[in-house]
Amino acid sequence: MTDWLSPPEIEAILLSLKVAFWATLISLPFGIAVGFILARFEFPGKQVVNGLVHLPLILPPVVTGFILLKLFGTQGPIGSVLKELGIVIAFSWTGAALAAAIMAFPLMVRAIRLSFETIDSRLEDAARSLGGHRWHVFCVVSLPLALPGVVTGAILAFAKAIGEFGATITFVSNIPGETRTLPSAVYSFMQVPGGEESAYRLVILAVLVSMTALILSEWLAKRVKTVVEGT
Amino acid sequence: MTLSVDFQVSLPTFDLVVAFDAPSGITAISGHSGAGKTTLINALAGLLTPNRGHIETDGRVLFSSELEINLTPESRQIGYIFQDARLFPHLTVIQNLKCGRWFRRLPANPSIIEDIVTLLGIEQLLSRRPSQLSGGEKQRVAIGRALLSEPEVILADEPLSSLDTNRKAEILPYFEMLRDQLNIPIVYVSHDADEVARLATTHLRLDHGKIIAP
């Protein structure tokens, strides 16, 4: 692999994988919580929450990146507090993970919400009649039955996070070794004379990674479904 | 033990107004479909809140509009046997059986579990998943699951109606056994006259939300 790819290319790929991994891992609990709440509860302002979750899907990514920069930049309302605590997100790979997580969140929540919605809520009633409190019922019945959707959501989010470009480059720029993820690297190689070849290699890799993620998520979701339903 | 019931639920087409005492044994509630049987039993289970009234078991108030008490389904200690069994598809039979004990933090007590497993004749099924069980087997496991949660009252909503004649004959004796051996009220909803005749110690007929003479 080292013969085929140059060190900056490998660096970009590894960084993308790291960013996508953390983005998915950290956002997953939130994705499960939001997906469950949207699927199971009616409350005032539900449409607003739903809209906010889906906003990154519809907004131009550069706008999302700009908002993140204003909020989490060292001068921003959240960023300045974090800076006091010694945490700087802007222009670092953690910022890239945050941007990727937010951009991938709608996909994750959609898949998870759908799978909670397809669970027969009468099974949850049965669990309550056996003495299960809400949290028990969630852990023992709802979450395991929704697992295929959770797996799909996580893999889709991972794939989306690897490919995120617009919000990332706006928020954390394009610093080699720190925030130059695979898409940013493709963009950079396209700007320099003789960089076409590197760009092509990364493009092929991006297509491969995305396709693998899609196929894997379908396959895994089916596997988990069989295991969960015991058929 | 006696379950005392007196409440009203407003439904779109009629009001369900009921008052009765269910002593230990089987109180059968019959009536045509749409007479309000499932609504009645869901209100007892706490899955639905009556507009007004009172539900209690020997002084333990489960619901009272006057006292503003409305215990959640999980704190009523009422075992519910559903028409469609509602076993958890991702758990094995033994996990389904144990789950109520785990929810209620009851001691694991292998001998109680063994007794009920033997009583219901489901020893061979313990490691199976619900999808690998027949209708009658599912219903036997559902009975065991409800019993093992150590309820003070058992509700059964047409537990045999989705079974064919042979399977019904397979399950009926178990309800007779519950009636004769457990000293708790069992509220048993059915529209089948034979079933009611065979099981009921008390018989109530529901028509358009009112209890009429059987």
Image (tube, coloured by chain):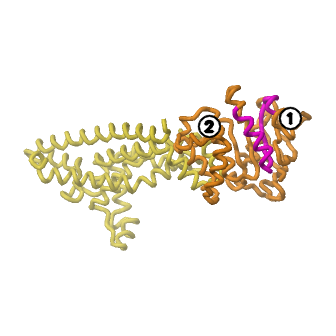
Q: Is residue B49 left or right of residue A156?
A: right
Q: Position of residue A219 (x, y in %)?
A: 36, 37
Q: Residue at point 71% right, 48% down?
A: B79
Amino acid at the residue labelled 2: Lys
Q: Is residue B175 magenta?
A: yes
Stretch in magenta? B170-196
Mark 2: give few (<14), some (14-19) or many (20+) Cα within 10 Å.
many
Q: Is residue B153 above or below residue B16?
A: below
Q: Which circle's residue, 1 or 2, is located before the other in the chain?
A: 2
Q: Nearer the viewer, residue A230 or B36?
A: A230
Q: CB atoms at circles 1 and 2 under 8 Å apart?
A: no
The residue that label 2 is drawn on is: B138
Amino acid at the residue labelled 1: Arg
Q: Is residue A122 visible?
A: yes
Q: Is residue A103 magenta?
A: no
Which chain does the residue under circle 2 lie in? B
Q: Is residue A26 left or right of residue B108?
A: left
Which chain does the residue under circle 1 lie in? B
Mark 1: give few (<14), some (14-19) or many (20+) Cα within 10 Å.
many
SS class, disc 2 = helix
> Could you say which disc has been placed on residue B205 in the image?
1
Number of labels in the image equals 2
Chain shown in yellow: A
Q: Residue at point 69% right, 51% down?
A: B73
Task: Check the rendered structure and report the hue given to chain B.
Answer: orange
Q: Is residue B15 left or right of residue A67?
A: right
Q: Tell me which corner region of the image, top left, top right, bottom left or bottom right, holds residue A117.
A: top right
Same subunit under labels 1 and 2? yes
Q: Residue at point 33% right, 56% down?
A: A22
Q: Position of residue A99 (x, y in %)?
A: 34, 54
Q: Position of residue A200 (x, y in %)?
A: 15, 40
